[in-house]
Image (spheres, rainbow, N blue to C red):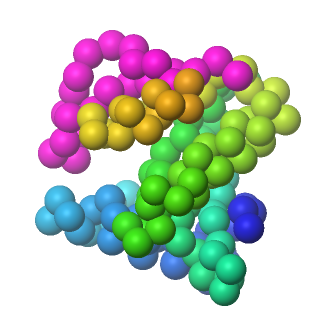
Amino acid sequence: MIRFIRTEQGEYQELLDIRNKVLRIPLGLNIWDDDLSDEDKCHHLVFFDELGKIVGGLQIKKINESVYQIRQMAVLSEYQRQGIGGALIRAAEEFIKQEGGIQVLIEAREYAIPFYSRHGYEVTGNRYFKITLPHFKMVKNI
């Protein structure tokens, strides 16, 4: 099941724990050191397993009236390669379309480019480093 959660819900802490485990700890970083002050301005989409446990999620940030950004995509390693990431992307794109968005941006870690490419995203611009890893901007018109 996929649904939105709010930052004031307890489930949000679960999502932060997943993001920390998947996106920060492997780099020797801690999400609690990040500036999370704009999190309440984003939409948080999460995927629940059959037992109701959050196993992945992403963030949607509105850039302007027609452009949105998908950020902080994380799926627990034991649930990866089961279609959860793709389901989250499709649900996020559907929401963005309903909101009037026509373009989606992603700052993809270099190793994630094949995943996003399979979902129709194209690399734009040059490689750059963010949180110690090479990234590329990717875009998709929806």
Residue at image point 22% right, 27% down: 128
Q: Residue furthest bottom?
A: 51
Closer to the camera, 32 or 55? 55
Side of 89 where 74 appears, left or right:
left
Q: List the single residue furthest toward the front.
A: 82
Q: Is residue 87 visible?
A: yes
Q: Residue at x 20, y 35 (%)?
A: 134
| Quadrant of the image containing the C terminus | top right
Tell me the chief SS of the magenta region. Answer: strand
Q: Quadrant of the N terminus?
A: bottom right
Q: Is residue 57 positioned above or below 116 on the image?
A: below
* Rendering coords of residue 54 (x, y %): 58, 75
Tag count: 0
Residue 81, x across and y down, in percent: 46, 56
Q: On the image, which quarter does residue 63 sit in?
A: top right
* 110 left or right of 61 in image: left
Residue 32 in sight: no
Residue at the spot x=37%, y=67% of the render? 77
In the image, is residue 71 above or below residue 8? above
Front-lying residue, 142 or 105: 142
Q: Is residue 126 magenta?
A: yes
Q: Residue furthest top?
A: 125
Left or right of residue 93, residue 69 in this image:
left
How far across and how far down the image is residue 66, in percent? 71, 21
Residue 132's place in the image compared with 79, above or below, is: above
Which residues fall within the magenta stretch? 121-142
Q: Nearer the viewer, residue 133 or 84?
A: 84
Image side of residue 134 versus residue 82, left or right: left
Which residue is rendered at x = 53% and y = 65% of the image? Answer: 56
